[in-house]
Image: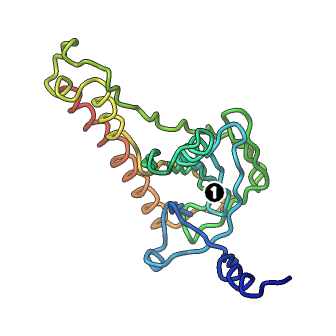
Amino acid sequence: IQNDGAKDDLDEIFVRSSDALFVYESVQLDLTLVPSPDLENESKVSDFLLKKDKNQTGNYIALSNGGVHFINLPWIDDISAMVENDLNCEEVLFETPAEVSYLLCTQPSINSLCSAINGCVLANENILCLLHSGEFTKLSIPKSSPHILESKNFNTSVCKFNSPLRQLRGLGSFDTHIAKILKRNSSLPLIRSGEGNRTLPADEYYRLLTATTQILREEYLQKMIHAKIELEK
């Protein structure tokens, strides 16, 4: 005996869900060190080849005409731990952002020729690249920033610190504070181009020198000076 009413109720309950894409985090990759002034406010689409680091979850190598980028996604480890330990989303804090390092720039400016990457393999803690020019380049995989956890069992009253800031923050919190200061938002890559015997125009050289100097000043020198001041307080 077929109950048509019950069938209609089931059809209303079991509705086929449509596919959905949830974007947790967006990562922006620089394709050149010196973008063209005419294209600074425009988004450029480029083809990328992603290679997964089999030795470390959450690590990826991105290959493009712009060169080689190393990407670390710490939240992938957090999700894996959540699934393995059967935790709820509320019990896991996905607060660590992605880390992106520009390792090799194969097109310094939008007007320069690209030194295409013919091959790329991961060997231990290095990336081996074969360029279109025949040059063989070895890149070191950057180590992820340590995620320093504050120990709740650490009794700061037992230890005597010369620095009032250390006494106030405690050992774990102070180390985390210094690590955040030294964390770089951009890196200076190894530069190669496909110009061969041709030389870049003088204005391209000047803009390239200005861009690299700015990265060194803002991401290295200024942050080291800031950390030094905090350590001496």
Residue 167: quadrant of the picture? top left
> In this image, 76 relative to 125: left or right?
left
Q: Compared to 203, does 171 lie above or below?
A: above
Q: Compared to 113, does 233 lie above or below?
A: above
Q: Could you tell me if residue 194 is visible in this image?
A: no
Task: Please identify the residue farthest to the left as the structure is shown.
Answer: 164
Residue 159: x %, y % from top left: 22, 13
Residue 16: x %, y % from top left: 70, 77
Residue at image coords 43%, 46% = 93
125 and 167: which is toward the camera: 167
188 and 163: which is toward the camera: 163
Residue at image coords 43%, 77% = 41
Q: Could you tell me if residue 23 is visible in this image?
A: yes
Residue at image coords 27%, 34% = 227
173 and 101: which is toward the camera: 173
Quarter occupied by the N terminus? bottom right
> In this image, 67 relative to 227: left or right?
right
172 and 124: which is toward the camera: 172
Q: Secondary structure at mark 1?
A: strand
Residue at image coords 33%, 49% = 218
Residue 21: x %, y % from top left: 60, 70
Quarter occupied by the C terminus? top left
Mark 1, residue position: 67
> In this image, 124 relative to 225: left or right?
right
Residue 168: x %, y % from top left: 17, 28
Within 10 angstroms of label 1, few (less than 14), some, or many (20 or more) residues? many
Q: Which amino acid is tagged 1? A: Gly
